[in-house]
Structures are given as structure tokens and as C-alpha cells.
Image: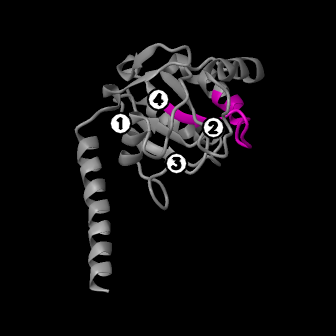
Amino acid sequence: MKLNIATLFLSVFSVFSSNAQEKANAANQSFYDFNAKSIDGKEINMSHYKGKVVLIVNTASKCGFTPQYEGLEVLYKKYESKGLVILGFPCNQFLSQEPGNEADIAKFCSLKYNVNFPMFAKIDVNGDNTHPIYKYLKTVLGGTMGNDIKWNFTKFLLDRSGKPVKRFAPTVKPEEITDDIEKLLAKK
């Protein structure tokens, strides 16, 4: 019994130590330190978006929330000229709802929702292969009941300096975050 309690204590301690280390690493990082592959395979440094309000969304083509692409595109068209950029990161980790390759995803987004905001190559948002951008975002803005992304269309809003300021659940529709976006756009 003593061995089990000691093992449990060490496991809990290692999780807290790991979380503390991740927070310390995130404190020394910036969103602009990261790169990601665009949907057409080009390496993009996030510093390309300096000075913009950024909305990052993990997307999927075969999800009940997929119609949010329409709302995201409306936001993008409305606020792009004022400094908003939306970055879509397809993910197939939730019931395999993004099974296609990058060409399939790009075609779907273009034909079905006329998406013009930047889309990126498919990534993992949880687990051992979590993309570094998502490791960073989840560490800075933890979620309810743990930091993991719970489903497709989780949204992260970053201010013009690249600081993550708010995380939105998948059930929050793009049009429901207009006030938060406008407040950040108003700050120069």
C-alpha cells in the first residue's frame, strides 16, 4: 500500500512539475516564435501576423460545427481591413471528422464556404504530436476541466501583440465573439 501511495504522489508531482515547466516555457515564448505549414505546404512564421488581432481555430469538414466556417468567413471579410486575421488549423483527432488531405480540405473550404482566410496543414491539437502552437496556446489559456482541446472549432483570440487573451468553446459561434474582436481591434 505504501508503494502505491508513493507512486501516486510521484505521478501527481510529476504532472504538476511538467505543467509548471510548460508554463515557464510559455512565459518565455511568443506566438511569433512559431511556424506552421500553410495548406499549400509553405512554411509560415507567425511573425507574419504581427500587429494583427488573430483568431485561431481548429477546424474539421465533417463536424456538426463545420457550418461555423461561414461565420468565420463573415468575420474575416468584415474585419480584415481593420486588422483581423483568422487562422484555420484542420485536425482529424475528433471522431475522424477531417479525413481528407490538404488538397481535399482546401477544395472543400473553397467550394462549400468560400473560405479566404489562411488555412494551414492538418495538425494534432492534443497528445504526443500536439503542434507547438497549440501546446503554447493551451498552456497560456487552459480550458475547463484540463487544457486539452475538447472538440473541433475551439477558438483562441490573440491581441495585436500576439498575446492569447481568450479561449472559446466550440459551441461559441463566430458571431458571438464580435464584441471581443472589436475591443481588441480598437486598441492600436
Marks 1 and 4 close (CB-CB < 8 Å): no
Secondary structure at numbered mark 3: loop
Disc 2: CA contacts within 10 A as few (<14), some (14-19) or many (>=20): many
From what the image shows, is residue 22 above or below residue 15?
A: above
Quick one: SS at disc 1? loop
Residue drawn at the location 65% of the way across and 37% of the way down: 175
- Does 59 appear in magenta? yes
The magenta stretch is 55-72
Which sits in the foreground, 169 or 186? 169
Q: Is 109 included in the stretch rendered in magenta?
A: no
Report crowding for label 3: few under 14, some 14 to 19, many 20 or more residues within 10 A (C-alpha): many
Instruction: Farthest residue to the bottom: give it.
Output: 1
Q: Residue type at mark 2? A: Pro
Q: Mark 2 or mark 4: which comes first in sequence?
A: 4
Q: Which residue is mark 1?
A: 163
Q: Are marks 1 and 2 in contact (CB under 8 Å)?
A: no
Residue visible at 24% across and 50% down? 21
Local packing at callout 1 (Cα closer than 10 Å; few below 14, some 14-19, many 20+) is some
Where is residue 7? Give x, y as percent.
29, 73
Q: Which residue is label 3 attached to?
A: 149
Residue denoted by label 2: 174
Instruction: Give the alpha-carbon distance from disc 1 to disc 4, as whole Å.
Output: 9 Å
Identify whether 120 is placed above or below 128: above
Query: The residue under label 3 is which amino acid type?
Result: Ile
Give yes or no for contact between labels 2 and 4 (Cβ–Cβ under 8 Å). no
Q: Is residue 1 left or right of residue 96?
A: left
Instruction: Identify which residue is drawn at 65% across, 19% down.
Output: 106
Instruction: Name the residue rendered at 47%, 54% in the picture.
Output: 143
Nearer the observer: mark 1 or 3; the answer is 3
Does label 1 or label 3 sit earlier along the sequence? Answer: 3
